[in-house]
Amino acid sequence: MEGIYAFCVGLLTACGIFLALRGRTFPVVVGLTLLSYAVNLFLFASGRLKINAAAVLGQSEQYADPLPQALVLTAIVIGFAMTAFVVILAMRGRADLGNDHVDGRLPDIQARQRNRTLRK
Amino acid sequence: MLNNLIWIPLLPLLGTLVPLFASRFSRSACAFLTAGLPALALILVLQNASSIFDGEALYTVYNWIPVIGLELAFRLDGLSLLFALLILGIGLLVILYARYYLSAQDSIGRFYSYLILFMFAMLGVVMSDNLLQMWMFWELTSISSFLLISFWGHKTEARKGARMALTITGAGGLALLAGILLIGEVVGSYNLYEVLNSGDVIRDHVLYPVILVLVLAGAFTKSAQFPFHFWLPHAMAAPTPVSSYLHSATMVKAGIFLMARLYPVLSGTELWFLIVSLTGLATLLLGAYVALFKHDLKGLLAYSTVSHLGLITLLLGMGTELAAVAAIFHIINHATFKASLFMAAGIIDHESGSRDMRQLNGLWKYMPHTATLAMVAASSMAGIPLLNGFLSKEMFFAETLHQDSLGSLSWMVPVLATLGGVFSVAYSTRFIHDVFFNGEPINLPKTPHEPPRYMKVPVEILVALCLLVGIFPSLVIGDLLYAASGAALNGIPPEYSLAIWHGFNLPLLMSFLALAGGLTVYYNRKELFQFQAQFPDNDPKLVFEAVVQLIQRQAETFMQLVENGSLQRYAYMMLSMSFAMMAGPLLDLNATAGLRPELPVDAISVTGVILLTLGAVATVVWHRERMKALVSLSIVGLIVSLMFAKFSAPDLALTQLSVEVVTVILLMLALFFLPQQTPKESSPRRVVRDLGLSAMIGGVIGTICYALMTRPLDSISTFFVENSKTGGGGTNVVNVILVDFRGFDTLGEITVLGIAALGIFKLIARMRLYMPASDENGRPWTLDSHPMMLAIVSQSLLPLALLVSAYIFLRGHNMPGGGFIAGLITAVAIIQQYIAHGVDWVKPRMKVDYQVLIGSGIFIATLTGLGSWLFDRPFLTSWFDYFSLPLIGKFELASAMMFDLGVYLTVIGATMLILANLGKLTTSERPVVSETD
């Protein structure tokens, strides 16, 4: 089970980073969201995986580690606030700069292509 | 020992302010007031002179930063005394001179202020008893020199000259700092006393060559030694008082001073001899030769200064004690005659309007008084008997005969020295003959005449000194020279004679040869000028500028490479770096799997993993079609919350689920204002590159995660599990940790949440967005934006949702739930009303200010924490007890519930502030911030 769990974390990380490296803001936000899933799962896993062991006293015989759970719980909520902040920043960036590229300007390749077509 | 040493540099420091205030008075009053504090400092120096002539040295120390060996330490020994006298004495003369030299348009207050600042810095250099402190003053002289050279900032050459001087001397200063730090490492102290007594330690140390080269780089740049000499002639763009003071008498001597100061420590080796004497010799010859061809009066004097500085350096490099005495003697003599010559050149420039010797001819007729003074000083420069320049030059010639460090080639040194003397005589003759005789002036801007009476006084004083030293050397200068030489040698100076007449000997013959040769060269100057004209006139300024521009271009190319403004690129580099740092240590891990037994795999889990994989991959594949990507993303979020549920974290599952809802709503709202599609602009290379990097990082993270999970855990959590019920009064350990054990963390976290929400509110309020009137295919938005079914269902769901959230909140302490989850559920329920009915419907029905909600949430949480202070307990100590009421039965009351209420309110407030305001953007209720706040 640990193997496929680790696979999920790795896959989410890879997908998150690939999208975070894109040039437009929206894929980057989606990528960061994926990445935060991965980070939360990773953090949670540091308490090791246990089944039927919720950390509620008297409900089961053994308890999962509650500390990483408490950390991840707040991390999820703060993660939402940060996602929201980045999204609004992206919208504001588009409003103020006229494009949604993370660099704040369109890449040179496009400009070069445009120049080439203009010259033709 | 109590003494007044500190006041000698301190008075000029205070004096920098005087001219700024005094400039409102007349120019004479300003000059007079400015001179006051330096004059006082000079008196202090003279008071201490007698004890120093007796062989004492005075010290004063104040601790500054003892940990790094920094102290405020001053010393006054023979060498410092000599330089302090030069700095203050010539400084006062220059103040008087500048009063007449500067025109009415020049800001005399600013000029004097810079000048006194320099005086302070230079006194600091020569009086410092700590090398680091000396370096600080050293840099201050460079800076004040920059300010003075660029005093006429409207002139290009002043700006360029100032920049060049600062670059060269500043770079040298950095080298010097490195050298000083190494000395400090070797000796273990920066205190000059200890350094001077550790000569053998330093010379025997393996780092000695490095130290020597670094320190000499500082000295050579400052004292304009070849190949760094070129900045000095360009510094002549400064007003002439500055040239006279800084660039002949004092600042350029700082490098010489440094060599003399560290003479007992660094000299006496083959390396010292080779570098210092050969540099000095090259500078001496080059300067003397070039000086002859300069048509500019100040240019001639500048190169002559370079040449004389080379002469002193050569003397210091020879390594004999007598040569060091001669060097010190020449420092004094050069300062007097060269300062007076610069002042005379300034007078000529001032009263005739030109410095070009091709125009200046026959001035004897117009200004006989000035001409006499200049001629005496120039004769001293040439080394004519009965003047001070003759004496030190004679000593110099004698010393060149007494060294044998170049082996069988040692005979070349006196010959080349004589050659330097020849050119020295030639350019001095030119200065006299070309300017004051040689026919009539040509096209001068104004008719030359004698300057104001007091402008000549400083020149007269200096020329009188030349004569006095030249005729009664031991009477006038004997004590000072003895004390200074003793200090430079860190011991007792050797026997020497300051007599004018030593009989017929080789040095006298050399002087005679130089005189005869110099006159011959000058007489045949036409041929020599023609010969020189064949060579291209390569201006070192152009070379310097080219080098500076080259460095700048290189720097730009480099910056373009590492910092081109593309965040996308930075993100890539940062991630590559983190990959390298993560992957490295993993190579040392022997086995991926640890000893902890793994859980068995079941079919449901495999199904979940397949769904998650599909969702994540679909998000990536469809990332250009943003709506599809968003839907795939929500699948991933759903599976993640199921994973939490599966692995015994019900609180996390609930939180993730409700956050998932608000996140997707948020992203959908945002998508309305953003392009619906992402253009295809990444090159295939970049896509492959990014795929590679992300796959590698994913692999590494997955490996770490796996290795982590398969290793046994020794956690501190046992404490929380054991004390949850007894100490915190709750059975849901996760919730007790949040609101009790780690309550302070949670308080910080809800504060961050609140701040983020307020920040978002501000960002939204000033947003000017393009709102699409139709979707991407041109279809208009639906007219029925609030469908009736949705409205009815969500309205009837609202009380139910609120009831659920209240239940989740109340049971949170003992069962999965709590403030965070309850807050999110409430927020989702309210948002649903916005979606179903629109802002216009919700607004009159929900009169809650979300900003106030955030504030009161944090307030309640903080207040709960503060409450424990009433019972003399630390912040956030929790309290709980059990009560029983009829009908309800036994129940628990805990202070942690109040805290959780604060969390609950903050979460609702923050979530609603973000989503509701984003939703309102399209409506008339859009948030507006007045421009004034």
Image: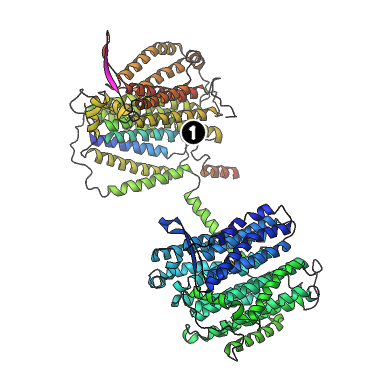
Residue at the image position 51 percent from the left and 42 percent from the top: A107
Image quadrant where residue B208 sits: bottom left
Image quadrant where residue B291 sits: bottom right
Q: Is residue B593 in view from this perspective?
A: yes
Of residue B477 and residue B667, the one placed in the foreground of this image is B477
Q: Is residue B337 left or right of residue A58?
A: right
Residue B76, position as x, y percentages in the image: 52, 67
In the image, what residue type sits under mark 1?
Ala
Q: Is residue B224 in view from this perspective?
A: no
Q: Which quadrant is the C terminus of chain B positioned in?
A: top right
Image quadrant where residue B227 sits: bottom right
Q: Which residues are magenta?
A: B876-884
Residue B554, position as x, y percentages in the image: 52, 57
Residue B18 drawn above or below residue B739? below
Report helix, strand or loop for mark 1: helix
Residue B559, position as x, y percentages in the image: 50, 51
Of residue B490 and residue B413, the one placed in the foreground of this image is B490
Residue carrying label 1: A90
Of residue B887 and residue A76, the one placed in the foreground of this image is B887
Of residue A62 and residue B348, the one placed in the foreground of this image is B348
Chain letter, disc 1 residue = A
Residue B304, position as x, y percentages in the image: 63, 74
Residue at the image position 27 percent from the left and 15 percent from the top: B883
Query: How is the protein colored in the picture?
Result: rainbow
Q: Is residue B32 left or right of residue B583?
A: right
Q: Is residue B877 magenta?
A: yes
Residue B375 drawn above or below residue B513? above
Q: Residues within 10 Å of mark 1 (few under 14, many from 20)?
A: many
Quick one: which residue is furthest to the top in this view?
B887
Residue B564 drawn above or below residue B722? below
Q: Is residue B802 magenta?
A: no
Q: Is residue B355 left or right of residue B399?
A: right
